[in-house]
Image (tube, rainbow, N blue to C red):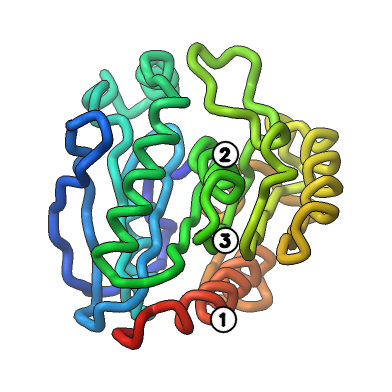
Amino acid sequence: MCHTDVPHGQVTPAVDRREVRVPLATGEFMPGTLLTDGSEGPGILVAADIHGPSPFYDALAARLASAGYTVLLPDYFFRQGPPAGPDLESAFARRGKLDEARTLHDLDDACGWLAAETGSSRVGSIGFCMGATFTLDLASTRSDMVTVAYYGFPVPQSTLVAPPPRPVDLVESQRGPVLAFWGEEDRGVGLDHVRAYAGLAEQANPAFAYEILPGLGHGFLATSDIDDRTDPGGRTWHRVLHLFGDHLRDASGGTA
């Protein structure tokens, strides 16, 4: 299960939103929303799942913005346009048209743009499902990242039409703080791949940490109370906030 709607009872903070066009190396511009609370804090990129920048991700981005960060929610499906419908089948059909290796370069450009916008020496990223696969790749291809990955695919599915680089193939180059989460009941991601990836990441990167949550499946944050530290999913969210607080605040150039 991926994310589209804001969970029942979860309040989206009121923050400033600005539509932006992120320049890419191709000469194109990737659209996105920049969310802030007016404090000009360090930047965090939110990489959404197969549905793109849905209300769920806008709400999470607003939460991060209300914590003092400059948050970019890009639409990396901009070349494909909106899906034919709101159902998962339409989302998969649109994904089949996406060059995911090209998308990784687009997100790399977006991280560079966000660093320049905020004047920070480090950029945060948080990704979910296919978006988490991208953030794990970025943790291995950039040296300035503070990375969070929820249920990413260390080995992307063999059915993908134009897959991104496999994070497991890049893991020896992983750098910077990385925090990754998976659910123990996630049948699609391949827990054997997860454990193999985590073992290699621990050897390559002393700043890598991960958790496999018992009893939870794919997309568990969509059914979690992220305000409740006793909720397993909520506890992961508080770990995320601590990670960004510990490793982005000192890289903000004094503006946060």
Crowding around mark 3 (Cα neighbors within 10 Å: few <14, some 14 to 19, many 20+) is some
Q: Left of 91 or right of it: where is 171?
A: right
Is residue 32 placed above or below 207 in the rendered structure? above
Q: Which mark is residue 224?
A: 3
Q: Earlier in the sequence, mark 2 or mark 3?
A: 2
- CA gap between label 2 and label 1 equals 23 Å
Which quarter of the rendering shows the N terminus?
A: top right
Q: What element carries label 3?
A: loop
Q: Residue at 34% across / 62% down in the picture? A: 115
Front position in the image: 72 or 170: 170
Front position in the image: 78 or 82: 78
Q: Is mark 1 on a helix, strand or loop?
A: helix
Q: Residue at 42% across / 60% down in the picture? A: 8
Q: Which amino acid does label 3 sit on?
A: Ser
Q: Which amino acid does label 2 sit on?
A: Thr
Q: In x, y percent, where is residue 172?
A: 74, 44
Residue at label 1? 246
Q: In x, y percent, where is residue 44?
A: 40, 63
Residue at label 2? 133
